[in-house]
Amino acid sequence: MSLLKNKEKVPVVLADRILDVAIDQFGRNGFDGTSTRAIAKAAETAMSSITYHFGGKEGLYLACADRVASLMAERQKSGLERGRSAVPASPADATEAAVAIVDSFAAMIVADDAVAWVRFIIREQFEPTEGFERLWDGFMSRMASVMLGLVRTARPDLADDEIAAHCVLLLGQAVILRSGRASISRLMQVDRVGPKQTDALRAQLRSNVRALLAR
Amino acid sequence: MSLLKNKEKVPVVLADRILDVAIDQFGRNGFDGTSTRAIAKAAETAMSSITYHFGGKEGLYLACADRVASLMAERQKSGLERGRSAVPASPADATEAAVAIVDSFAAMIVADDAVAWVRFIIREQFEPTEGFERLWDGFMSRMASVMLGLVRTARPDLADDEIAAHCVLLLGQAVILRSGRASISRLMQVDRVGPKQTDALRAQLRSNVRALLAR
DNA sequence: GTCTATACTACGATAGAC
DNA sequence: GTCTATCGTAGTATAGAC
């Protein structure tokens, strides 16, 4: 059972194993701060395997962006589909759909097995490279368009700029659960942000989304 | 005039010039991704000056953290003092004080001359090092305690955990203005997030804080 | 496909001139 | 105080064995 779990978590295919390690390391230390030697060592392979499979460090980085986008898109797929189908509905339905989407996004943000993806994607926000295009086209654009549609339905009184601002600030509340984690543990006076804290934060976030989209 | 502006922006004292460059570079590329050689070159000095003034790369990094904390504390000083004096007042006063503090925090987050500080501090959130202690003790702890006090006064009905969660999510909305900047420009369909967009976002943020702290 | 060996560049730290 | 010169280590890329 433990072995099976391991088999799922550590891909047997070398290229996938390299990608998983690389997403983690690039996310932690950035492109320049990560060495292909360290990635190869952690993936238990030779450095030249990276050249063979990805053409070099930069090719590996872009492949990481593609993988993060597809993993995130996969995980948020059901949530986004629910949101899309709610677009033509009433403002109240759109609000509840937005609550569900932001909560599902927040769940991914705090999930342990998605930490590396989130770290990678948030880093790319600060100094966008070509990797950002991959992330945006592969995942973030879908999340954005669904949220824009829901907020527009929930609040038909708002102008386009206000709708966009709402989306930014709603999703920002989810992002801070990871991008402010060190401060959250201090603020909540715990050593580690555990399930108890994340549950409380997610509950407050759902309540906030409802309050902000209500007229 | 252009010269004078330059003289203000580029410190004549070598140690300060090194610090300004280092905050920028560490913020962009992280500790490992930044080379002391590059810092020395950008500060127009020899690499060994870093050893002389800061004892080495790590000493320079910690000095950067101290400087960011003190620069932020200085800029938020008047805002925080106003907030502190409002703690014993009515819930309505506390709410307005919280609106002012979050807005002043957001103003710093989006300010051009504070970009490097914010980048440095947000990066330190993901992989906290000893630098985080300096940032927390020198600035963030004050912001946290004032916000906690204001939310407690504004919403005496809430439990401690709920108060902390509120603070996290309120400040998170300000942080996303920088940590989601690449996505914001896509969401708002502009090439660059300019004054028009930041004004709209800050207005929405003030409105959100009011709505969330109202009972 | 994956490995070892190697060429070349850049890193941080330090010693010593001025 | 600030510089140049240099040491040992570690970086990416590539060639070639298997």
Image: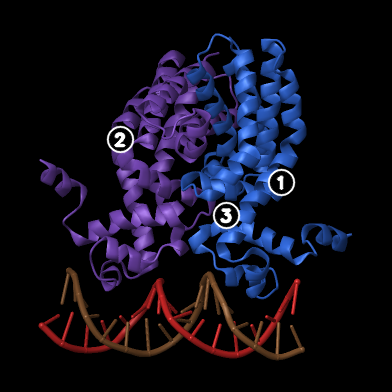
Chain colours: A purple, B blue, C brown, D red
Between B155 and B46, the one nearer to me in the picture? B46
Q: Amino acid at mark 3?
A: Gly
| Secondary structure type for disc 2 | helix
Residue at 69 percent across and 37 percent down: it is B107
- The tag earlier along the polypeptide, 3 or 1, is 3
**Dot 2 falls on which chain?**
A
**Share a chain, discs 2 and 1?**
no
On the picture, is B157 further left or further right than B107?
left
Can residue A165 be seen here?
yes
How far apart in space, not on screen, are marks 3 and 1 (Cα)?
15 Å
Q: Give the residue pinned by disc 3.
A: B27
Residue denoted by label 1 = B71
Label 2 sits on residue: A77
**Quadrant (top left, top right, bottom left, bottom right) of the C terminus of chain A:** top right
Q: Which residue is at the far right?
A: B1
Camera-near label (2 vs 3) is 3
Specify whether disc 2 shares its chain with disc 3.
Answer: no
Horizontal and vertical percent for residue A51? Answer: 30, 71
